[in-house]
Image (tube, helix red, strand yellow):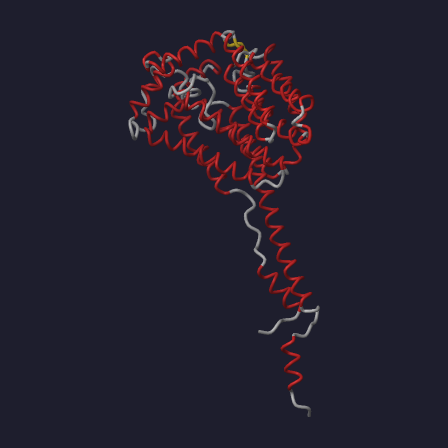
């Protein structure tokens, strides 16, 4: 077999270089789209009765579509932010992360002063549309990812690793606890522990930080009437399901009524009678009643798929920052979803947090989509790096072949035929 010229080798080598693929994680994108469509469908079914009295209270005109249109506006905003975040290199979040941390801290202070008063709580602005605690969950993961990556060499020290991390998380948790918002406080503390662990810090410091967080969590529960009552109700429910909190009992009634395949979308009766907050905290119970075990398992599976793709992207990330962002942001969304579902099933104390993509709430939807946009950008950067490495490999192979041929333009077989040709 003859060896072609260097130019021919180069051309044939370039022909074998793979063309650029779609630089985005398609399974993750499909999962997000399905969650959004499914979530908006179930949110609409669960919220139409609440829409009537909320719209009449806020606008004077009752409409069963009020919450649907409001959620749609936030959905469009979230999709725009997700698209922008998917295009912007995630390394550019280093500087904005600092300003976002400060802005969120200021908003957590302001909501205690001028936020909407609901009973004894102040948690939101603009009639519950904007909740700084939801933004705080996103920002704590983003800021800690940037900070932990920058301080990687000193993370295992007490003065420069453990103490600053406790201050960063503690300031957020303290102001959220003052609202008070028990579930958001515990979530911020859990996210801080999770990010510190994902950064690869020593087991000793992780144990100290976990012990400190557990102590703070106990104090918060001990001196918070709502927290103590929820823990007591959980303990009683583990012994006798009829002694669970009314919220959990009504949710379980919805699941039992739904059976295996549900009563049909829109046909839930508990959302109109006994189920508390069917459009926010209890939307998963509406899914269980209207779509049965099949629908509930589908929701659980979709969030499991989301977790799997996020961790796969993190494992392929080009650097430590990308790995921390992809894993931290994904696990935050999935953890919040499973905490909501587990509390409604009575397997953990009632948390009161929302179900991402399903519960009514603009802040949670927008920041969740923004977070997934950053995860998609990490997948894009990883795919681009793989394509560049593949191209470099082919180019190196071509150069190696040309060097072995001695950079000669005439192949050995052609020279041999020339020598055997008789002289004229």
Vertical order, 40 against 392 (above or below):
above
Percent x, y for residue 185? Answer: 54, 17
Quarter-wise, where is residue 66 in the image? top left
Residue for point 50% across, 43% down = 26
Q: Quadrant of the N terminus?
A: bottom right
Vertical order, 264 against 319 (above or below):
above
In front here: 1 or 174? 1
Q: Residue furthest front?
A: 204
Quarter-wise, where is residue 418 in the image? bottom right
Residue for point 35% across, 31% down = 295
In screen coordinates, is 170 left or right of 246?
right
In front here: 152 or 7? 152
In front here: 106 or 69? 106
Q: Quadrant of the C terminus?
A: bottom right
In screen coordinates, is 37 left or right of 101?
left
Q: Residue furthest right?
A: 407
Percent x, y for residue 215? Answer: 55, 14
Percent x, y for residue 74? Answer: 52, 27
């Amino acid at each position: 077999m003859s060896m072609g010229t260097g130019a021919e080798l180069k051309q044939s080598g370039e022909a074998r270089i793979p063309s650029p693929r779609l630089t985005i994680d398609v399974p993750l994108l499909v999962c997000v789209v399905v969650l959004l469509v499914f979530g908006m469908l179930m949110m609409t079914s669960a919220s139409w009765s609440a829409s009537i009295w909320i719209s009449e209270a806020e606008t004077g005109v009752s409409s069963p579509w009020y919450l649907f249109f409001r959620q749609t506006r936030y959905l469009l905003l979230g999709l725009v932010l997700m698209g922008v975040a998917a295009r912007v290199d995630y390394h550019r979040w280093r500087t904005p992360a600092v300003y976002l941390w400060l802005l969120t801290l200021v908003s957590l202070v302001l909501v205690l002063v001028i936020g909407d008063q609901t009973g004894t709580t102040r948690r939101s602005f603009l009639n519950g549309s904007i909740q700084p605690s939801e933004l705080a969950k996103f920002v704590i993961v983003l800021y800690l990812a940037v900070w932990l990556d920058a301080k990687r060499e000193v993370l295992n020290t007490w003065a420069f690793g453990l103490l600053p991390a406790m201050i960063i998380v503690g300031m957020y948790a303290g102001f959220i606890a003052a609202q008070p918002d028990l579930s958001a406080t515990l979530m911020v503390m859990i996210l801080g522990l999770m990010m510190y662990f994902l950064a690869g810090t020593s087991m000793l410091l992780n144990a100290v930080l976990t012990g400190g967080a557990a102590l703070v969590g106990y104090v918060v529960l001990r001196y918070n009437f709502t927290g103590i009552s929820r823990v007591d109700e959980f303990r009683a429910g583990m012994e006798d399901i009829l002694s669970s909190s009314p919220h959990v009992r009504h949710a379980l009634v919805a699941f039992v009524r739904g059976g295996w395949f549900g009563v049909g979308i829109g046909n839930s009766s508990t959302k109109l009678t006994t189920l508390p907050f069917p459009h926010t905290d209890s939307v998963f119970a509406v899914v269980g009643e209207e779509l049965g075990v099949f629908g509930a398992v589908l929701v659980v599976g979709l969030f499991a798929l989301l977790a799997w793709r996020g961790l796969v992207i993190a494992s392929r990330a080009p650097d430590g920052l990308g790995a921390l962002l992809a894993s931290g942001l994904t696990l935050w969304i999935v953890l919040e979803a499973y905490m909501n579902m587990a509390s409604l099933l009575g397997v953990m104390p009632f948390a009161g947090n929302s179900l991402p993509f399903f519960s009514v709430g603009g802040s949670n939807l927008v920041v969740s989509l923004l977070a997934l946009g950053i995860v998609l950008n990490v997948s894009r950067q990883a795919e681009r790096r793989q394509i560049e490495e593949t191209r470099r490999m082919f180019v190196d192979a071509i150069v190696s072949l040309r060097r072995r041929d001695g950079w000669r333009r005439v192949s050995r077989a052609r020279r041999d035929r020339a020598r055997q040709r008789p002289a004229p």
